[in-house]
Image (cartoon, helix red, strand yellow):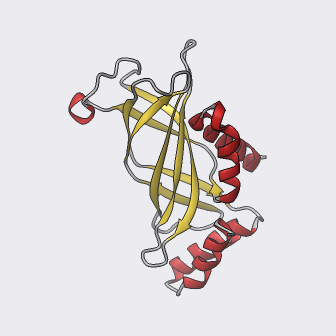
Amino acid sequence: MNNLFSSLLAVGLMISVAGPADAGKTCANNQQKAGFATPPVKVHLRLATPQENHQPTANLPKKAEALAVATLRSISPEDETIRGDIFLRLTADGGKPARTLRHEVTLQWVRGTACPTLRLQVPLIKGSLIDESAPEAPREMVIIQPFVIRVEETAENLSQMLCSWTRQINAGRPRRGVISAINRALDPR
């Protein structure tokens, strides 16, 4: 049930980022770029200061909470970093439209992570929120502090490969084979 919720949330966020006109195209692109969506996590963000932003930002409180979902896209065999996207949705308050952010990130395992709960470190993110009701409106710059995404082990093949990879990391064993298998599962083309 949790995987279903995170998948639906990720698809909903992709549709809201792309807008209604591009919704079908976004879903089609997502099927080609399979990836692995993590469960949603609540994150704290703050507005960029005028020195960081160079634009007025009057529509958001100074600090806010949002839901974030990471989609893993590929793993670099050289440095074992995970490349993916973060989809973030700041929920609407008092009739205001929701705002979204999509940002490419490089994730890393938290040291010593192991199944049944894998932990991925998301770095500092600076990005622009898109107002869903007016995507062409001026964008508000936000800063999201580093946070951790927890992924629970399941019986799914990709989940088991991620667990195998972390066991090999923790044991200091070679892992090129499992990384190649994960990359093939993430992008079956």
Farthest residue to the top: give it: 94
Residue located 58% across and 37% down the image = 18
| The one of 39 and 181 positioned closer to us in this rendering | 181
| The one of 44 and 57 positioned closer to us in this rendering | 57
Q: Position of residue 123 (x, y in %)?
A: 40, 53
Residue located 46% across and 26% down the image = 136
Query: So how many labels did they put on this image?
Result: 0
| The one of 91 and 42 positioned closer to us in this rendering | 91
Vertical arrangement, residue 42 with respect to residue 84, above or below? above
Residue located 62% across and 56% down the image = 151
Vertical arrangement, residue 66 with respect to residue 76, above or below? above
Residue located 62% across and 69% down the image = 162
Farthest residue to the bottom: give it: 174
Q: Position of residue 29 (x, y in %)?
A: 65, 52
Q: Is residue 5 left or right of residue 113?
A: right
Q: Quadrant of the C terminus?
A: bottom right
Q: Position of residue 103 (x, y in %)?
A: 47, 47
Q: Is residue 53 left or right of residue 4?
A: left
Specify the quadrant of the image occupied by residue 152: bottom right
Specify the quadrant of the image occupied by residue 16: top right
Q: Is residue 49 left or right of residue 65?
A: left
Farthest residue to the left: give it: 51
Vertical arrangement, residue 47 with respect to residue 110, above or below? above
Q: Position of residue 178 (x, y in %)?
A: 61, 80
| The one of 176 and 40 positioned closer to us in this rendering | 176
